[in-house]
Amino acid sequence: MALEGLVGRPVLFGVIWIGLAAGVFGAIEFGQVFLPSRVPDPSDVWLGVAASGLGIWIVGWLRQGYKPG
């Protein structure tokens, strides 16, 4: 919602946001390589990216149908 200029272009907004989510979750999993008590797992990255995509979809759905006051 903070990027109002991209709301008119949902595909571009989605691609940028999913790319950022993949970068963040990928970096977290990469950091687990250096922790002996953790095992990096690519499914955690996919789960985080899928949840981010679902969140984008829910916000778009709410913005279309929600009329305040």
Image (cartoon, rainbow, N blue to C red):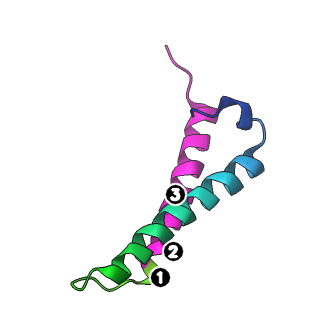
Q: How far across and down, in percent of the image, does residue 58 sit?
A: 54, 47
Q: Secondary structure at mark 1?
A: helix
Q: Earlier in the sequence, mark 3 or mark 2?
A: 2
Reading the chain from its start, which is encountered first: label 1 or label 3?
A: 1
Local crowd at mark 3 within 10 Å, few (<14), some, or many (≥20)? some
Q: Which residues are magenta?
A: 44-69
Do the CB atoms of the residues marked 3 and 2 lie less than 8 Å apart? no
* Residue 45 to residue 69: above or below: below
Residue type, numbered disc 1: Pro
Element marked by disc 3 = helix
Q: Quadrant of residue 35?
A: bottom left
Decide: few, some or many residues near mark 2? Use Cα within 10 Å; few <14, some 14-19, many ≥20: some
User: Mark 2 to mark 1: distance in Å?
Assistant: 7 Å
Where does label 2 land, which residue? Answer: 46
Query: For the residues marked 1 and 3, what is the alpha-carbon distance in whole angstroms?
Result: 16 Å
Q: In percent of the image, x 41 and y 68: which residue is there?
A: 28
Q: Which mark is residue 60?
A: none
| Dot 2 amino acid type | Trp
| Residue sitting at the far top | 69
Residue 59 in picture, x, y percent from top left: 55, 42
Nearer the camera: disc 1 or disc 3:
1
Q: Which mark is residue 42?
A: 1
Chief SS of the magenta region = helix
According to the picture, the residue beneath numbered tag 3 turns out to be 52
Q: Given this view, does label 2 or label 1 mark the residue nearer the observer?
A: 1
Q: Residue at x 48, y 73 (%)?
A: 45
Which sits in the foreground, 45 or 54? 45
